[in-house]
Amino acid sequence: MATSLGYKQPLYVLPFDHRSSFEKGLYGWSGALNAEQSAQVTRAKEVIYDAFKAAIGAGVARERAAILVDEQFGAGILRDARQNDLLCAMPTEKSGQAEFNFEYGAAWADHIESFRPSFVKVLVRYNCEDDEALNRRQSARLRRLSDYLHNRAYRFMFELLVPATHEQLDRFEGDHDLYDRLLRPSLMVAALKELQEAGVEPDIWKIEGLERREDCELVAATARRDGRSEVGCIILGRGSNEQKVRQWLSTAAGVDGFIGFAVGRTSFWDALVGLRDGTLGRQQAIEAIAARYREWVDLFEAPRP
């Protein structure tokens, strides 16, 4: 029997817990950051947070809206969100790593208790046809985290990425789109089952975009199998273009078990680049991010035939 608490309410996440992609991708920095560089990343994340609050002020339901932000650059944001009864999630994984491990090593639990977020999130790369020893190491750490969170009534958000192995990609002559459409859905289902059987019990699965409704239905049914009827799934944006994100959200919307989305870079990246380059002012960037986030909400909530 599953030990997850589950989460069935609609959930629309604006994630900006990215760390290495801010440092390297947005600003082009490498190595340890100095104090001013760290402060610059924090200021960029405060723009996104202000956009989130603006979207709520403009009509996005407060009880359905959530942020996902890291402690390193967003500690003040996490505390403010908790003080104002806004749903918030924080990551526990070390950023940019192929193998899941805890950001703060043996002290990971202390950091969770310091902030007491609504959700604790992990990002994990897990392919059942890849390195078995790697998967066992990851699932053992994830089982520890899962047990810890449910023993303390935290909700567990699991972002599952299934990168193709070289052999899998060779089957499709290097075509990532074909892999995504024809093989990744079944690999995701296998990964969910394998992790569940290892005692890893998320309340919410963050799922890479799926192009076929039947794949969404199968993933959701797997997430909810064997007594896990309260578990929810949300679609993530993968930093893809607007057209692709709209397709994924439209496909998942209305599928029983899919309760929302988590779309980050497609929501805020262009606005932050404009802010960085001086082509947008701060308020313009806030308005652009808020409008894009509200667009995703409207799309997911649109009536389905």
Image (cartoon, grey):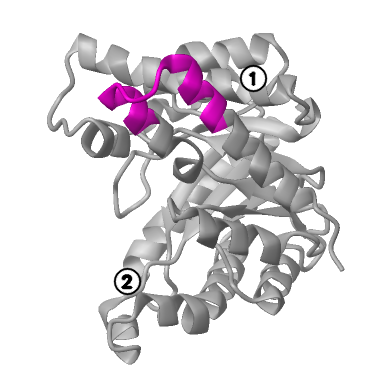
Q: Residue at x 17, y 14 (%)?
A: 34
Q: In the rendered view of the protein, which quadrant contains the C terminus?
A: bottom right
Name the amino acid, label 2.
Answer: Asp
In the foreground, 136 or 277: 277
Magenta segment boundaries in residue numbering: 272-289
The mark nearer the N terminus, 1 or 2, is 1
Task: Please say whether residue 114 is visible from this viewpoint.
Answer: no
Of circles 1 and 2, which is in front? 1
Indicate whether 119 appears above or below 136: above
Quadrant (top left/top right/bottom left/bottom right) for the N terminus:
bottom right
Q: Dot 1 corresponds to which residue?
A: 53
Q: Position of residue 61 (x, y in %)?
A: 79, 30
In the rendered view, would you say 143 is above or below 102? Answer: below
Q: Secondary structure at mark 1?
A: helix
Q: Nearer the viewer, residue 1 or 18?
A: 18
Asked if residue 13 lies left or right of residue 244, the reply is right
Tell me if mark 1 has few (under 14), some (14-19) or many (20+) residues whose alpha carbon lies within 10 angstroms of its own.
some
Residue 275 magenta: yes
Q: Observer-nearest residue: 53 or 157?
A: 53
Q: Which residue is mark 2?
A: 131
Q: In terms of depth relative to the viewer, which is nearer, 98 or 47?
A: 47
Q: Please tell me which residue is depicted at 34% across the width and 83% down the height of the picture.
A: 168
The alpha-carbon separation of the residues under discs 1 and 2 comes to 42 Å
Relative horizontal placement of residue 127, taking residue 251 as reference (left or right): left
1 and 2 marks in contact (CB < 8 Å): no
The residue located at (83%, 59%) in the rendering is 229
Q: Residue furthest left?
A: 31
